[in-house]
Image (cartoon, rainbow, N blue to C red):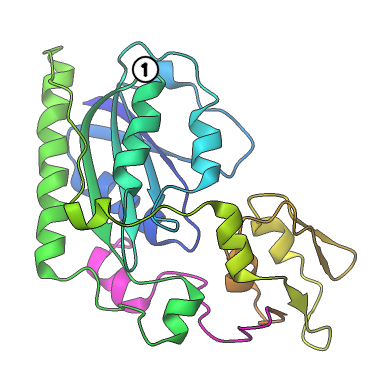
Amino acid sequence: MIKGIICFYSGSGNTKTACQYIAKKVTNIQFDFFDITVNKTPVFKAYDIIGFATFADFGGPPYLMQQFIEKFDDMENKYAFVFNTFGFIGGKTLKVLGKWVKKRGFKIIAGHSLHTPENYPPMIAKGMANLKAPNKKEMKCFNDFITKLDKLAILVQEKKNIKEKRINVSLFNMLIPTHSRKQASKDMGNKFVDESLCNECKICEEVCPYDAIVCDPIPVFDENKCYGCWACYHHCPKKAIYTKKFNGVGNYPKPSKEFMEKFDINK
């Protein structure tokens, strides 16, 4: 059995759950997990295959994942795979993620995009939560990807040469424009706190991946650092954080019950 690590960025848990499912289903790879929001750097030389997993963010990978990947020097063809989840549209996420990873010297041998429930509040508020995602066909494709990854692991263990995979997305997704994270922050708008609801728990400060929140004792937002990821909005247990357009609606603090049942991680 070879050793692998999945470096993931999961805003509300969908991507993390999918990664746990990959690790549960494979038989030829012993996976560790690395949450890229932790201020550390993994030691890749201890692993035979590296996974990079994230969610689609306005048609592309999040800026935080780009920052993480750019930390590494040339990996000299270290085997890697890329994976992303998406709620409504995946856009160019997988293709761009693959481009970033390849640029650092990794050799990409597999890639997949998985449809998951929506966690973008404006979409949820419009009744477009997609709670039934992934459907049976999408789950089959996901399981086929895992099976292929498992077979590739055998070739890695046998030190066979593996052809690099070209990461492609559909023509429809290629036509979807990729917006900057600052545009996403602008669309979200300034954040405010309902002091009558805030219990000063500091969870928003803890979950903000961009260090844009300081609790003193209620949250103070640095809008120049914010990239509009909605983590603070989602995870506030009292729904005390709001914007001019959204207040207490569209929250998605963790994977839906329907989603978790499909992946059956706890069994």
Position of the N terminus, as image quadrant, is top left
Q: Residue at x 49, y 15 (%)?
A: 73
Q: Position of residue 145 (x, y in %)?
A: 14, 45
Left or right, residue 137 beside residue 115? left
Secondary structure under badge 1? loop
In the figure, 36 relative to 85: above or below?
above
Position of the C terminus, as image quadrant, is bottom left
Left or right, residue 2 beside residue 75? left
- Give the residue pinned by disc 1: 105
Residue 111 is a magenta residue: no
Quadrant of res 85: bottom left
Q: Position of residue 157 (x, y in %)?
A: 17, 18
Q: Residue at x 13, y 29 (%)?
A: 152
Residue furthest to the right in view is: 216
Along the line of sight, which residue is nearer the eye, 23 or 259? 259
Q: Which residues are magenta?
A: 243-267
Q: Does residue 235 appear in this view?
A: no
Residue 264 is a magenta residue: yes
Q: Position of residue 153 (x, y in %)?
A: 17, 28
Along the line of sight, which residue is nearer the eye, 229 or 116? 229
Q: Residue at x 41, y 48 (%)?
A: 54
Quadrant of res 226: bottom right
In the figure, 215 relative to 62: above or below?
below
The amino acid type, in three-letter code, at marker 1 is Gly
